[in-house]
Amino acid sequence: MNFLIRLLVTALAAMVTAYILPGVNIKDFTSALILALVLAILNLLVKPILVLLTLPATILTLGLFLLVINAVIILLAARLVKGFSVDGFFWALIFSVVLTVVSSIMHSIAGGNND
């Protein structure tokens, strides 16, 4: 149940973030739900591999390279999800940062527990 709530909150946060940023477009809430699911799967499967492969760059940049990895995950999700588009790497980077902030605020408002 907690996973479904997190997906719904992430989808809503993605809609809000896409509304704020002009370089990101989400067609409808169904596309946002699919985007939230795809992001969850990519963060589960692809992100750990990318983090491991880029560990020297991540250490050298004191963790800032993780923002680049997040942007790559967003760009990959844009290729996989119809109805979601990002105008470029810069917008993907900004989208990932704003999405993290907005979804964190929404999760705290929704009363999500930290199990």
Image (cartoon, grey):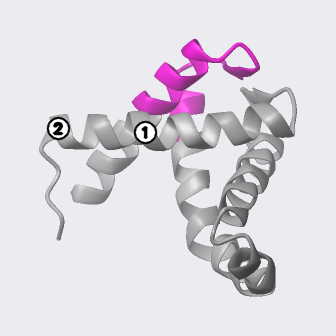
Q: Is 108 rendered above or below residue 47? A: above
- The amino acid type of the residue labelled 1 equals Val
Q: Mark 1 or mark 2: which comes first in sequence?
A: 1
Residue placed at 71% from the left, 13% from the top?
22
Q: Give the residue displayed 51% in from the left and 37% down from the top.
A: 99
Residue 2, label in figure: none
Residue 38, horizontal then vertical, whole percent: 61, 53
Task: Give the main secondary structure of the magenta stretch.
Answer: helix
Magenta segment: 12-33
In the image, residue 3 lies in the stretch drawn in magenta = no
The x and y percentages for residue 9 are: 34, 38
Q: Could you tell me residue 61's position as x and y percent?
A: 73, 70
Q: Tag 2, which secondary structure? A: helix
Q: Nearer the viewer, residue 95 or 86?
A: 95
Q: Residue furthest right?
A: 88
Residue on which the image places disc 2: 110
What separation in Å lies between label 1 and label 2 (alpha carbons)? 14 Å
* Residue 101 badge: 1
